[in-house]
Image (cartoon, rainbow, N blue to C red):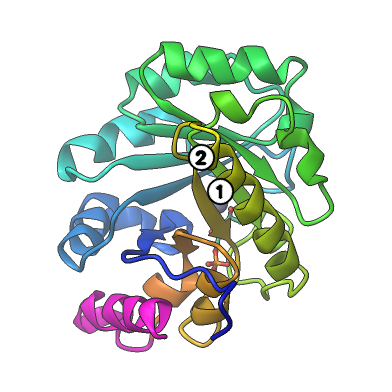
């Protein structure tokens, strides 16, 4: 470990229900909460911004009574704005979107917060961190994609580590100037064998879809893989 490594006391785990059994979603979200999940990561794909089609506000509303933990809605949709009030009403707690999919990023962030949710921007592997420059005071989360969005089960893109360090520095500098806390989440290809370097590079919140729901021992409960993810994430 070098002195510049990030070493948080707690790392939030956000299982992505994209890899869950959609026929038993209520049971699945209850199981991950019981296994120690901090957030439910909820992937919304529109077959326009990304080449896949998933779930919307009705499903968010349906799972809401099954868990206490926050629902972290990741919008992979274009345009963005019309869906925001629907997800806020459906019980979303965090709403993130891809800045290039919104015509007015500052306005979209404000709208999310005005509806009582936490707001965040998602940067694809090739999207510049400069998108964050003028909206730092409106962010509760930055989500760095470590795969190209659209599908679960892809391989982690290693250049995300340098980007995590860059955004970690920006967030720390912002907070040192008295700014609000901003969570730094990473999404895509997070596994037990790379979560340690991902956290050391600056992530405090990790999405894991196939690693949790596709684990070989998943049928016997998710606690095993979740505690191994957490153990690796916090290993020094
Ligand atoms: C990809 C989604 C991810 C995905 C992660 O577009 O945003 O949340 O479900 O899945 P894994 O962890 O399997 O890469
Ligand atoms: Zn996601």
Image: 172 above or below 103: below
Query: Magenta span has 235?
Result: yes
Image: 184 above or below 110: below
Q: Residue at x 39, y 73 (%)?
A: 212
- The answer for how far apart the CA atoms under marks 1 and 2 are is 5 Å
List the residue tagged with mark 2.
Answer: 175
Between residue 182 and residue 41, name the one nearer to us: 182
Quadrant of the image containing the C terminus: bottom left
List the residue tagged with mark 1.
Answer: 172
Query: Magenta span has 207?
Result: no
Indicate left or right for 137 with 218 as reference. right
Indicate left or right for 59 with 53 as reference. left
Residue 161 location in percent, x, y?
69, 69
State ligand 1's quadrant: bottom right
Residue 72 location in percent, x, y?
41, 42
Q: Main secondary structure of the magenta part?
A: helix
Residue 24, numbered label: none
Quadrant of the image containing the N terminus: bottom right
Q: Kindly indicate whether the residue at mark 2 contacts the one at mark 1 (C-beta within 8 angstroms).
A: yes
Q: Which residues are magenta?
A: 216-236
């Amino acid at each position: 470990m070098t002195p510049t490594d990030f070493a948080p006391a707690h790392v939030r785990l956000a299982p992505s229900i994209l890899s869950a059994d959609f026929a038993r979603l209520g049971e699945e979200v209850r199981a991950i909460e019981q296994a120690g999940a901090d957030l439910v990561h909820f992937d919304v794909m529109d077959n326009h911004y990304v080449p896949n089609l998933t779930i919307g506000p009705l499903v968010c509303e349906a799972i809401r009574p099954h868990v206490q933990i926050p629902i972290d809605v990741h919008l992979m949709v274009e345009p963005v704005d019309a869906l925001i009030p629907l997800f806020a009403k459906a019980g979303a707690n965090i709403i993130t979107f891809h800045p290039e999919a919104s015509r007015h990023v500052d306005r979209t962030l404000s709208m999310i917060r005005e509806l009582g949710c936490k707001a965040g921007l998602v940067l694809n592997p090739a999207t510049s961190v400069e998108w964050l420059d003028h909206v730092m005071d409106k962010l509760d989360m930055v989500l760095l994609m470590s795969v190209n969005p659209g599908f679960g089960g892809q391989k982690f893109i290693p250049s995300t580590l340098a980007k995590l360090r860059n955004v970690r520095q920006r967030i720390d500098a912002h907070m040192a100037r008295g700014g609000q806390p901003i969570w730094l989440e990473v999404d895509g290809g997070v596994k037990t064998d790379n979560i340690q370097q991902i956290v050391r590079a600056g992530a405090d919140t990790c999405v894991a879809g196939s690693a949790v729901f596709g684990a070989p021992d998943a049928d016997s409960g998710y606690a095993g893989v979740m505690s191994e993810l957490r153990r690796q994430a916090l290993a020094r």
